Image (cartoon, coloured by chain):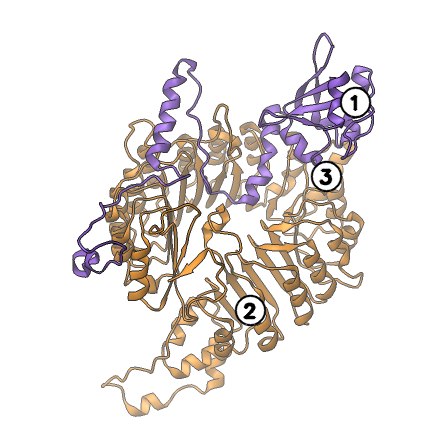
Chain colours: A orange, B purple
Amino acid sequence: MEPSELKRSKDSPNLDESTRRSSFPDEVLERVLSLLKSHRDRSSVSLVCKDWYNAERWSRTHVFIGNCYSVSPEIVARRFPKIRSVTLKGKPRFSDFNLVPENWGADIHAWLVVFAAKYPFLEELRLKRMAISDESLEFLAVSFPNFKALSLLSCDGFSTNGLAAIATHCKNLTELDIQENGIDDKGGSWLSCFPESFTSLEVLNFANLSSDINFDALERLVGRCKSMRVLKLNRSVSLEQLQRLLVNAPQLAELGTGSFSEELTFRQCVELESALSNCKNMYTLSGLWDAKGIYLPALYPVCTHLTFLNLSYAALRSDELAKLLAHCPRLKRLWVLDTVEDKGLEAVGMNCPLLEELRVFPADLFDEEIIHGVTEAGFVAVSFGCPRLHYVLYFCCQMTNAAVATIVQNCPDFTHFRLCIMNPGQPDHITNEPMDEAFGAVVKTCTKLQRLSVSGRLTDLTFEYIGRYAKNLETLSVAFAGSSDWGMQCVMGGCSKLRKLEIRDCPFGNAALLSGLEKYESMRSLWMSACNVTMNGCRLLAREMPRLNVEVMKEDGSDDSQADKVYVYRSIAGPRRDAPPSVLTL
Amino acid sequence: MENDLNLKATELRLGLPGSDEPERQMIPRPNKRTLSDIVSEGSRSTTEEDHQDTAPPAKVQIVGWPPVRSYRKNCLQGKKHEVEGGTGMYVKVSVDGAPYLRKIDLKVYRSYPQLLLALENMFKLTIGAYSEREGYNGSDYAPTYEDRDGDWMLVGDVPWEMFISSCKRLRIMKGSEARGLGCV
């Protein structure tokens, strides 16, 4: 949420008095504004004049809060009286990679208490990187009689008991989406808590959980929820059970299979293929845990209309992927493991001309034997076959400047370019030079670039390029890169639309930190860890910019003057009061 | 900018005015490696193992790197065996006193009782029941396994899935050495 201030309409000397007085009645204005969905448009609207600010706040039903500490629940409730749907994001993104201390914060409970009082008709809650306890889930379940949709992504602090409370009490639930959370899985009995009279579920995603659920309860649940369009199963659901579910739910649009590996008889294979071929609306497929190549042909009937295929939990070989992709001509989004290797990616280039998004995840993170995975060749092959590619996340073991130059020449429309060369500080493996020219090519060619993650050996030149050319850049992630403060200064000075900057293990110090003094209030947040910033530098920043929260996390055994981890963000709620002892607010 | 703010003059420090700290660059912190350390370690291993030709530089484990969510990392831990072994996860099994070793496919079994029964059948011996307190006390044999750290562990202590993903080979110990484990 942008901390917007109340602004009066500007007095224009040319504007007639009578023209200004003939404004829309409030009801009309509110009705018109209620059609605006984008929260950025709404923020712009609220800045026009006092009338529009009020009309906007009364008509807003969904609020998006990108940093839960940038504002307090009381302030939100005061400004927006009619909210029915809330999206909240909490911890800094590097908490996904264990860089944020335990008990850092971002607890949802204080928000729920205010919502229960001010928004009793709340329907939707979508949380990302928040801490949520079972008590909070129980409180949520009983406090909001109209509650419909709960989505938890990368959250932690709860167990399946909390889910049981949701299933038991939320009579109008349409969506339960549990993704990639640190959940304490105490067993699958939560699923049996949905009452027999309950039929409203449209989205059910429990792929995250490992325990066995009661399959009979699931089968009955799916059978009576006729509007179900998204079903993502966990690993405990077998192929045979999957077939039984599909027979009763041919209307599914998104399917996450369970385990795709146990032995099937010929008859069972045929039945599975038949059940899948009846799913005429299916456009997303995921799951495929432990997928064995021999059963993939059962998916062919569905593949023809698939637009999103998530194979990131199926360790397929290149030939298995190639055979599957030959049936997927309409694919727009593809996620795979690097077990498919460059040859598998060649098949992507050959079979998926409509591809817009590719994510290649590493299968083996602690391999001590021969390195497999993908190289620059795979990425180049995809770029030749998929000119519409605009989103890529690519974990590879080697890259060259020349390859990246070719890639962006083939695909100039990148909006998200996230390249991770897995060995930190690794240069171009053919020329042994830094990877500066690669990212230079990206920012020069891809004028629409919004998000960039850099890797490999990089000097300040990379950041000069970024500052000079990446004028639409909003999110930048940097690790093990740069030569001096100058690098970060270039970025802070040049990237006018920058909103999120996260940096780790780079030689940027106080001068770099302070070069962004005037910039941080227009950004959501800055993260710097294992850099050269000192406590004094942070104190100076905090002193100069009172509307920023400057938080430092110290590590055991480090120098007193070093600021090990720094998190800076704008806030209209002031310094937070729930910080654990390891987090110092300056 | 630095000159305008005159950072040095306003910097709060412990120390007499006039005493100066040297300008800091990349200082190696305790328990942390600098980038140059990591890169040189990598290249050092390569020269040592040059004669082995195909051995890559030893990978240093850095916190939070590569940037993959913990959830995904945990899911994929067990995958390694599946990719390498293809359709099976064969491990060597040795029995004290036997002239040669055998191999079994761990993926065929879903639980400890199934595995132990198979071992009993294969080697014509009795292992008996596992208890947390006594191990396989009362039996002449104790099934042990070597885990990824190279330690020899008693079969049955950890959840099955964890055992499967960490077991590298099995050894069925015999006699007094085996009975001794029950008293540990």
Looking at the rendered structure, the kind of residue marked 1 is Ala
Residue at mark 3: A239
Residue at mark 1: B118
Please identify, in this view, whether the residue under mark 3 or under mark 1 is nearer the observer.
Answer: 1
In this view of the protein, which residue sits in the foreground, A406 or A341?
A: A341
Q: For mark 2, give the secondary structure.
A: helix
Please, is residue A427 above or below residue A539 in the view? above
Q: Residues within 10 Å of mark 3 (few under 14, many from 20)?
A: many
Please, is residue A442 above or below residue A104 in the view? above
Which residue is at a point 46% across and 77% down the rendered structure image? A56
Locate residue A60 relative to residue A257 in the image: left or right. Answer: left
Q: Residues within 10 Å of mark 2 (few under 14, many from 20)?
A: some
Residue A98 locus on image (x, y percent): 49, 47
Residue A508 locus on image (x, y percent): 29, 48
Please, is residue A427 above or below residue A115 in the view? above
Task: Give yes or no for contact between labels 2 and 3 (Cβ–Cβ under 8 Å).
Answer: no
Parent chain of label 2: A
Between the residue at mark 2 and the residue at mark 3, the CA separation in whole angstroms equals 41 Å
Looking at the rendered structure, the kind of residue marked 2 is Trp
